[in-house]
Amino acid sequence: MSSAVRASRRGALAGLLSLPALARAQSPWSASRPISLVVPFAAGGTTDVMARILAEPMGARLGQSVVVENVTGAGGNIGAERVARAAGDGHAALFAHVGVFSVNGHLYRRPGFDAARDFAPVGLVCTNPMVLLASARSGIADVEELVSRARRGDLRIATSGAGSTMHLAALQFLDAAHGRADLIPYRGGAPAVNDLLAGQVDVLVEQAFSAVPNSRGGLARALLVTGGRRLPVLPDVPTAAEVGLGGLDLEIWNALALPVAAPAPVRAAWEAALAAGLQDPEVQRRYEGLMGRIPAGDEATAAHLGRLIETDARRWGELLRHSSAARME
């Protein structure tokens, strides 16, 4: 027998022996124990509520219970770093908003992770617009007066936390309006709302879910909605683009990601579980109650989320470089 034939047979045998391993590598993944869905914020916030709504239907698809774990601190960095450093075996995932994925890298000197490098995107979960509310005691009746006051520098704007998405939206408004204001960050939304209603501040930037109820008591007025659509519950309130503030076409988004070490079968299983969860009628009903919009089409893909993380990081990085927002440890 020639050496060429023997070599050919050895190659064929090696190929046959490798088939079981290849099949195992490409076989569908399923969870083998309960899954940790890390929310890097305290329980009760919008991101936490959204994660808990989605956990049960995703668990049904993944074959194990999905347990929401609140790992707080450093603006979401501690929880995000835990997932970034976790094994890529599919039993830990991150549920967080744009601030963690695209902003913290510019706000913190050492966030502990690089979102574009350390995470495998699973998909966008939901987007939520923000609302600019004016105190009834401010005398601001419409966007025209709001912009006029901003250009005079005669404006006090409250946000729920320095470096929060609402704070960045306020900076974006001032940039679009060519104005200036005293930006007053609060430790959370509740004290900011209280001061708005009492007339201690003129304007509050807040998530629509929280802002809409406060616009109905006569003590505050909704002036505009960020994002590209009017809210059905505020049909007479224009979008920023409709009043010429095109730079304010932004929304808060929440998304799901795995450690970058997760192999393709794990990623595929999570992407399918997320898609199934977002098609659940109860999930859709409850997200609608939070004034959230569920993505569809290309917007719902992992590739889209990867692009969104990077484009928003560039956008917010550019804004922060030209603002007085301080970097944090």
Image (cartoon, rainbow, N blue to C red):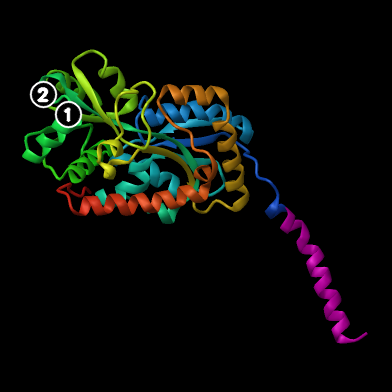
Q: Nearer the viewer, residue 18 or 188?
A: 188
Residue depicted at 16% across the width and 24% down the height:
141
Q: Is residue 112 left or right of residue 321?
A: right
Q: Which stretch did the figure color magenta?
A: 1-23
Which residue is at the far bottom?
2
Question: Could one spot residue 86 in this view of the protein?
Answer: no
| Residue 182 % position (x, y) | 10, 37
Q: Nearer the viewer, residue 145 or 84?
A: 145
Q: Is residue 168 magenta?
A: no
Q: Write down the quadrant of residue 171 in the picture.
A: top left
**Relative height, residue 66 to residue 105 (above, below):** above
The kind of secondary structure element at disc 1 is strand
Q: Which residue is mark 2?
A: 138
Residue depicted at 52% across the width and 47% down the height:
302
Residue depicted at 23% across the width and 13% down the height:
217
Q: Which of the two labelled residues, at mark 1 and mark 2, occupies the earlier sequence position?
A: 2
Question: Could one spot residue 31 in this view of the protein?
Answer: yes
Cα separation, mark 1 vs mark 2, equals 8 Å
The kind of secondary structure element at disc 2 is helix
| Residue 289 % position (x, y) | 43, 21
Q: Is residue 8 magenta?
A: yes
Three-letter residue code for mark 1? Val
Residue depicted at 23% across the width and 43% down the height:
172
Three-letter residue code for mark 2? Ser
Residue 203 - label: 1
Does the magenta stretch mainly form a helix, a strand or a loop?
helix
- Asked whether disc 1 touches disc 2, contact meaning CB atoms under 8 Å apart, the reply is yes
| Residue 210 % position (x, y) | 31, 23
Q: Write down the quadrant of residue 137 in the picture.
A: top left
Mark 2 Cα within 10 Å, few/some/many (few <14, many 20+)?
some
